[in-house]
Image: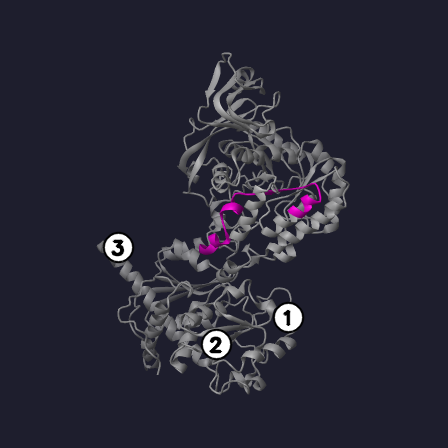
Amino acid sequence: MAEKGKTKEFKWQRKHLLGLRELTAEEITYILDTAQGFEEISARAVKKAPPLRGKLVVNLFFEDSTRTRNSFALAANRLSADVVEFTKKDSSVSKGETLLDTARNLEAMGIDIVVIRHNAGGAPTLLSKCINACVVNAGDGYCEHPTQGLLDVFTIRKRKGSLKGLKIAIVGDISHSRVARSDMWAMTKLGAEVTFVGPPTLMPPKVEQLPVKISYSLDDVIEKVDVINMLRIQFERLGGNPFPSVREYSHYFGLTVERMKRAKPDIIVMHPGPINRGLEIESEVADGKNSVILQQVTNGVTVRMAVLFLVNQAAAEKQAEAQNG
Amino acid sequence: MANKAKKLMGDELLIKNGHVIDPANRINRKCDVLIADEKFVEVGRVRKPVANVIDATGKLVVPGLIDIHVHFREPGDEEEETIASGSAAAVAGGFTSVVCMPNTTPPIEDETDVEYVHRKARKARKTHVYTMGSITKGREGVELAEMGFMSQAGAVGFTDDGSGVQDASVMLRALKYAQMFNVVIAQHCQDDKIAGKGVMNSGYYSTILGLPGLDPLAEEAMLWRDIQLVKKIKAGTVRYHAQHISTAGSVELIRAAKKLGLPVTCEVTPHHLLLTEKCCAEYDTNYKVNPPLRTEKDIEALKEAIANGLVDALVTDHAPHLQSEKELEFLAAPFGLIGLECALPLYIKSLIEPGILDWPGLIRLMAEKPAKIIGVDKGTMSKGKQADVTIIDPNAEYKIDVNTFRSKSKNCPYNGWTVKGRVEKTIVGGEIRFSAESCPP
């Protein structure tokens, strides 16, 4: 079974979750352990616990999302919080109300936690500096998607017991992927060896300075890895023409049944969704026995419950300290 | 006010006992400066009694500083800066002449626009305000703007600053056409295709911050191209000036061009000598500037270039923006930071303190050489020249406080920095236009 971290003496202090880059291995492990404790709630007949009763969570989404938005809403509901949906597609940049004005307006309505998704890297950081509510990053540009990173390591830990020494490949458009970044921080901090796999045109600048290995060949790494995370090709983010055709991309970087034959028998296949079937991953593989794609979704709710719980607790403690001090 | 000013002009003004630095005349010693009728009369020991005396004991007395790269936002964005507020900021920073960039709204693209800037500047009555005109109509990079009429009206050069002229054939045409007028063509070197939607230097930090990067190559590719174009122009007819160079690669290109004897000059800003891409790590948009903050390696290269005489002018690229605009996401906020009121101490910090330049060297790059680039008869204290003087207390130590700035905008990343070197008095055409005592910091 999954190992529990040494978290006895540890105290969670952060009222915001902005990214995994700034977290220590201990903090990440603490979130995972907390999530593990919450798993049981989702298994109940009455899927509800009271820790966030009377708290107001706002889903402030400036980009399209169904999975993450619903997952956060479910997580908040299971902890008895009230949820307000606030979707403002593409209204962030230059025109109309600014992000800060939107946030200040929401704060005036008495919110406790803002879950924000935004197309600009750093938008949650900006928000956290200007409002009192807790800020949880649900994806900012191609900077980070911390809860995705957490649910990915949570899923791996459940299957493999620990991340220490695991070889993990993350395949696809690394350059525009916040999932790749958050995964990299979480996985490497927990002791895994991460390889970014993709064409050079989809690697970010100075990728060699990141704590990862780099490969341009999926065939070279497929046999060696314990976990493979197939990123979605995000056509909406691709600028220009980083690869000649979808056909050629699939040929070199698609996870096919053929390629899977060369993989370790107990390899875990992951995908942050939504899947482009037949493009980065063949249906038989996505739905196959090695796939944990749906467990990722289940675990997403659990991990987000832990995150909402912890930031709220830290905020409450900070407030109590301020009042006593 | 006007009467008083007139009266003063007729009078003599003596700046006594200061340490005078006038690199053009190889003066670097304690002496006096006598001014009469707006002009320098004598630099040396002045023994005759004069009614108006400034005691400059312990101070540096230098030719008025010249900043050939500022944005005063007028016409169009007067809420950010006006020619009046920018001029007040300029004299407070010791600048007796500035050159406005033409990327206003609408841009400066004919003689009426040039005259408008001059008229506003006369009304402000602070610093000499020059302007460059646009190279192309609407700064669109397609058709040439009326360079002839604009230079007749007093434009001191041409640039599409804010962006570079993308089309090589248009740039070549601009350089060729400008041969008639003996002017400088200045370029904001940036190949837009390579630059893409970049908002900070392309590198490790842009990658971990998840922000699109501006590759140094965007600057270098256009600079390289322009140097090839300059080679095609007859010597002695037109001058090319690379604005705010920021990369080690650009330094190498400038070095090569100068070695060939091409009429190529360049300028550097304080922020490209003091700040790196790492400053963007907290998404503070006061560090969002174009060209972007680069790396330590680039700073070293720029400093070495300055030490070796490859850089011709130190400028501010004073670029005011409203706080409400700078409060946006890093991706959405505008580029630019202000610098007129702290440039001198920042140059002392980045160049004098580490021993890269001595004082005459600094004044050469802040007065004498910039004047030559724009072709105005300034930047020296030669007898008979218009008396523009900056008096500096080189040892005064203080904290930069944006709330004391005359600029309408506050987008300055140096707020709170402890610096050395204060402008004590700024004299423009023999008239004291700024005095630190009357406006304590």
Identify the residue shown where x is 55% and y is 86%. A262
Q: Residue at x 67, y 31 (%)?
A: B154
- The spot of residue A22 in percent (x, y) is 40, 63
Judging from the image, what secondary structure is the residue with disc 2 in?
Answer: strand
Q: Estimate how packed mark 2 is, as few (under 14), some (14 to 19) or many (20 or more) residues with alpha carbons within 10 Å.
A: many
Q: Quadrant of residue B70?
A: top right
Q: Is B191 left, or right, of A25 in this rendering?
A: right
Residues drawn in magenta = B255-282
Q: Give the quadrant of the C terminus of chain B.
A: top left
Residue B433 picture location, percent across and down: 51, 26
Query: Residue B100 appears at what percent x and percent y?
Result: 60, 37
Circle 1 residue? A243
Q: Which mark is residue A183?
A: none
- Eye-nearest disc, 3 or 2: 2
Q: CA distance from mark 3 to mark 1?
A: 54 Å
As displayed, is residue A317 above or below residue A73? above
> In the rendered view, does A250 fall on the left or right side of B325?
right
Q: Return the chain for callout 3.
A: A
* Cα separation between marks 2 and 1: 24 Å
Q: Which mark is residue A168?
A: 2
Q: Amino acid at mark 2?
A: Ile
| Left or right, residue A72 beside residue B266 | left
Name the amino acid, label 1: Phe
The three-letter code of the residue at mark 3 reads Ala
SS label for mark 1: loop
* Mark 3 on the same chain as mark 2: yes
Which residue is outermost to the left? A324
